[in-house]
Image (cartoon, helix red, strand yellow):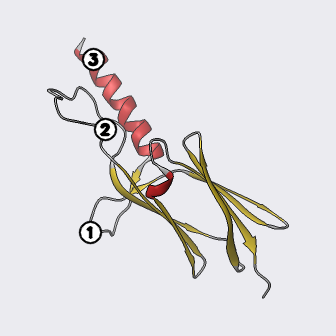
Amino acid sequence: MWAQAVALLEEAEGLHRRFFRLALGEATPVWELPVDILEDEGGLTIMAALPGVSPEAIRIEIGSGIMSIVAERPMPIGPGVTAIHRLEIPYGRFERRVELPPGRYRLEHEQVANGSLLVRLGRRSE
C-alpha cells in the first residue's frame, strides 16, 4: 500500500512539473501555464490553459517582443472545510511571459472558453 501511495505521488508531481513550472527570479510564486503559439500570414494565435480562471481575472500585456499573461486562480475553499485531502492544481497569482517571433503585433481579439484563453495578435505595419 505504501509503494502504491508513493507511486501516485510521484505521478502527480511529474504532471505538476510538466504543466505548471515554478518561474524563477520572482519575489512571489508565479506559475507558468502551458501555451501553444501558431503563426499564419496575418499574425499569431496563442492559446493558454487557464482552467478555473474567470475572464475578468486575466490581464494581457504586449511589449518589446514579449506577451505577458497575468492572472489569479482563487482557492476554491470556503468556510466549513475541515480537511484538504489533495491539492494538485496551483492557486494564487501567476504570470507567463511568452517571447514572440520577430515583428510588431497588436492585440486583435481575446476570448476565454472551455478553460482556455485564446489570443489573436495581428501584424502591425513597420
Residue 56 relative to residue 44: left or right: left
**Amino acid on which disc 1 is placed:** Ala
Kindly check if marks 1 and 3 are in contact, taking CB atoms under 8 A apart as contact.
no
Residue 120 relative to residue 64: left or right: right
* Alpha-carbon span between mark 1 and mark 3: 36 Å
Q: Position of residue 93 (x, y in %)?
A: 34, 57
Q: Position of residue 88 (x, y in %)?
A: 34, 36
Q: Secondary structure at mark 1?
A: loop
Circle 2 or circle 1, nearest the eye: 2
In the picture, the quarter occupied by the N terminus is top left
**Amino acid on which disc 3 is placed:** Ala
**Residue 17, label in figure:** none
Q: Which residue is mark 2?
A: 76
For the residue pair 19 and 119, the one nearer the viewer reads as: 119
* Vertical placement of residue 7 versus 110, above or below: above
Circle 1 or circle 3, nearest the eye: 1
* Alpha-carbon span between mark 3 and mark 2: 30 Å
**Amino acid on which disc 2 is placed:** Pro
Q: Which of the 4 image quadrants contains residue 102?
A: bottom right
Q: Which residue is mark 1?
A: 27
Whichever of labels 3 and 2 marks the residue nearer the N terminus, that label is: 3
Q: Which residue is mark 3?
A: 3
- Rendered residue at 26%/69% (across/down): 27
